[in-house]
Image (cartoon, helix red, strand yellow):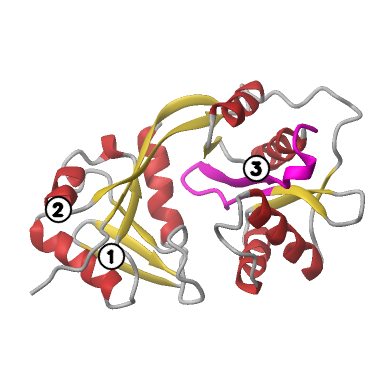
């Protein structure tokens, strides 16, 4: 599965407004944000970069005032990690990713569970963005750009789903990017603290996964943030299939 996930990562970055391809790497940038979760690079499967290739990649980030950062499945390009570490890159995070297929998907069985909705109004996308920001401790503050990215996800072949709160706001939601090379990534599953423990994450994840299978995706994959969320996903039919490594370069060389 590593190769499918890595090919997806390449195809997904090639959708960014600005793309730089150099030395076996693809870097995707969005000038509307400096978010590291949007502006990053990944290697082509089988890449064997040299020092000059890594230096060119670093320069593409530096000239935009961004921190050089990559996300990739290391098994698909074994020569990449040593080359990056030789240039000073260090581990930011490492995640096991889970994969669901139409054969393994198991929808929640509670008929009285949360009602999942499809956003259509600007106010709904803004409310989802705000809810996800709150769910993740405001690490990425809610913004007009964040709401716009959610709308683009829905309009460009991906999907966004949410559960409405009793006061009419948003209790929780998530998104999934448009499929590429037969798979797609489900991301941003979050529930406001006041509404946790009510099956919202499970309902939203199942709805998004099913929507992608209806559109012809052969699999959906995601990364999880803790053992509690992993159990939620595994109950829905997600299974561990591999690792993804995040490497970043923090300091600009002196001299």
**Residue under the image location 62 percent in, 41 percent down:** 216
Which sits earlier in the primary sequence, circle 2 or circle 1? 1
| Image x and y of residue 160, in percent | 70, 53
Residue 206 appears in the figure: yes
Residue 182 falls within the magenta-colored stretch = yes
| Tag 1 residue | 21
| Tag 3 residue | 212
Q: Nearer the viewer, residue 123 or 238?
A: 123
| Tag 2 residue | 49
| Image x and y of residue 110, in percent | 85, 24
* Total number of numbered discs in the rendering: 3
User: How crowded is the residue under tag 1: few (<14 C-alpha within 10 Å), some, or many (20+)?
Assistant: some
Which sits earlier in the primary sequence, circle 1 or circle 3? 1
**Residue under the image location 55 percent in, 48 percent down:** 179
- SS label for mark 3: helix
Residue 73 falls within the magenta-colored stretch = no
User: How much space separates mark 3 and mark 2, taking CA atoms?
Assistant: 35 Å
- SS label for mark 2: loop
Q: Is residue 239 above or below residue 25?
A: above
User: From the viewer's perspective, is 75 left or right of 111?
Assistant: left
Which sits earlier in the primary sequence, circle 3 or circle 2? 2
Residues in magenta, as a range: 174-198
Q: Point out the frontmost of discs 3 and 2.
A: 2
């Amino acid at each position: 599965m590593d190769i499918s996930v890595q090919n997806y990562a390449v195809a997904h970055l090639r959708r960014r407004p600005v793309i730089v391809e150099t030395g076996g790497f693809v870097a995707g940038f969005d000038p509307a944000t400096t978010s590291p979760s949007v502006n990053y690079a990944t290697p082509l499967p089988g890449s064997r970069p040299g020092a000059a290739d890594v230096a060119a990649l670093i320069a593409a980030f530096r000239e935009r005032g961004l921190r050089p950062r990559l996300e990739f499945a290391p098994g698909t390009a074994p020569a990449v990690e040593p080359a990056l570490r030789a240039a000073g890159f260090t581990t930011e995070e490492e995640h096991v990713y889970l994969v669901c297929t139409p054969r393994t998907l198991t929808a929640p069985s509670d008929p009285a569970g949360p009602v999942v909705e499809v956003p259509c109004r600007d106010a709904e996308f803004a409310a989802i963005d705000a809810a996800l920001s709150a769910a993740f401790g405001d690490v990425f503050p809610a913004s007009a750009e964040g709401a716009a990215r959610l709308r683009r996800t829905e309009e460009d072949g991906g999907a966004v789903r949410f559960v409405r709160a009793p006061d009419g706001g948003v209790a929780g939601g998530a998104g999934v990017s448009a499929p590429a090379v037969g798979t797609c990534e489900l991301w941003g599953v979050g529930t406001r603290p006041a509404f946790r423990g009510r099956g919202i994450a499970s309902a939203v994840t199942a709805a998004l996964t099913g929507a992608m299978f209806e559109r012809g995706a052969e699999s959906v994959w995601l990364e999880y943030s803790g053992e509690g969320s992993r159990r939620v996903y595994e109950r829905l039919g997600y299974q561990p299939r591999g690792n993804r490594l995040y490497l970043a370069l923090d300091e600009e060389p002196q001299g």
